[in-house]
Amino acid sequence: MRNKITKKLLLYFLIIVLANSLISSGIFVVLGQKVYMDAYKEYLARRAEDIAQAISDNMDIFAYAAEEETTTPGRGKKQGGKNNPNTRVQPKYIDWMDQVLEGKVWLIYKEDKIFQRGNSDIALSYDDLTDYEKAAIDKAFEGNTVTSESFDNIFDKGTLSAVAPLKDSDGSIYGAILIHEDIAIARRFIDSAFYVLMVSGLVGIFIVLIMIIIFVCKFIRPINRIDSAAKVMIDGDYQVRTGVNQDDEIGDLAKNMDELAVRLERGRKESENIDRMRNDFISSMSHELKTPVTVMKASLEGLVSGIIPESEIENYHKILYEEIGVLDKLVMDLMELNAVRNKSFPMNFKEEDLISVLKDAARSQRVLADKKGVEIILNIEDSYYMFSCDYTRLRQMFITVINNGIKYSDADEQVIIRQFRDRNFIKIQVINKGNAIDSKDKEHIFEAFYRGKNTSEKGFGLGLAIAKEIANRHAIHLHVFSESERETVFEFVLQ
């Protein structure tokens, strides 16, 4: 999967880079060639206009008359000059301009439309031109400067020509100048520029490709870490972490994967705890049921077989009744534990005086305390404290803990019930003195059917589990600790 994603990203980026390079290069070549040729044409047209202006300004020097002088009746002798329609530029000056300008200069006169060159052996007339060429000459005769690549029958192919009007001193157009230059150099420059652009593009593509590989690998690396973490999680190890910490969508995905691992690990521990509790429950149930069932079975076998003397039958009936009572209490406790654990089980919550509930629970246990010689001491700070609760369940919770304190207190000791405020919390402590609870037992003391190994008290180990569930339903935090080796404290914390 990693290689596939990497290859796809490389391919996509490469296609984008190539497409961008080709499009950019094509636009650059087309627009560059057009801009360069337009600028070159503008330059050539300006040269043609400058040469035409120079010829017009210096026509007294360059000119000679086609007829050295003409005589008009009644007017006398007419000399050649700027305003003579038969004025021509001397061929030697045209040759001189060819050499200075490193180009070919042609002149055409509007009167007879005959081309003039420095080399008199070359003869060309207006009628020899094509329609496109005639149109360019006609525009020049109208006063426009024109550039064209259509004079191929006059000049070599691959030349650029410019035609500019020739004007005399009063601004009248008497001819046109035609110059041309070989644009092969310009084309070679464009080709060279294209070659440089192509080489630069290939080098750029190569460099970009290397950068793409680096960036793609950097982009893929956190995804690979997430993928590796996911595979480890599939194998059942939920303690793995992605190790990705970045502020983007991939970072959010990594955080979600880490959070998923945390929750799965928590779920795994809860599942293991539930399995252990279920196994402990089955084991405890088997153990608790074994004794009464065995007693009942033996008693019933004796009664059925008739081996029990008549005088003992009543005692056996009492034994059976007591054992059935034990089983009944076990079943009732199990039903109650299941009820308070069920979140949908309704409780009758009302505003009650917590202090009254606590005192009522303590009062109900005085008979048991007196039988054992234990004194119940109430140390109450508040006269009353209103609290939303189920009176019956909350009283049951306090009775269970107080009863537990009495049972595990030494004779002639005290069970102290304290109520006080600690910052924003209301705390109630039930303190008894006797053998302290073992640290290992503290971890499981609120679990169903759990009983300390060193305890001699009878019971099923369900009372504190039920009290814990009632506390949870009332958002009361119940925990146990020992302040000394002979003192145990059960503490209720209410906010």
Image (cartoon, rainbow, N blue to C red):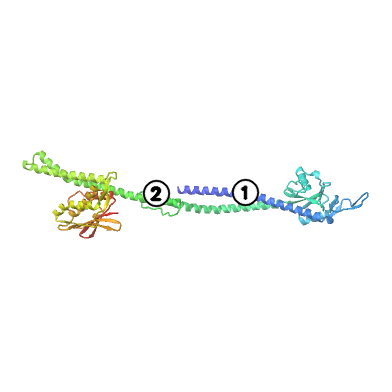
Which label is found at residue 27?
1
Give percent across and percent down for residue 220. 46, 51
Q: Amino acid at mark 1?
A: Ile
Residue at mark 2: 231
**Image point (23%, 45%), residue name:** 336
Secondary structure of the residue carrying numbered label 2:
helix
Secondary structure of the residue carrying numbered label 1:
helix
**Image point (10%, 40%), residue name:** 303
- Quarter that holds the C terminus: bottom left
Give percent across and percent down for residue 318. 11, 43
Instruction: Say which of 105 and 493 sits in front.
Output: 493
Q: On the picture, is 72 further left or further right than 252?
A: right
Q: Residues within 10 Å of mark 1 (few under 14, many from 20)?
A: few
Which label is found at residue 125?
none
Give percent across and percent down for residue 468. 25, 50
Q: On the picture, is 489 further left or further right than 29?
A: left
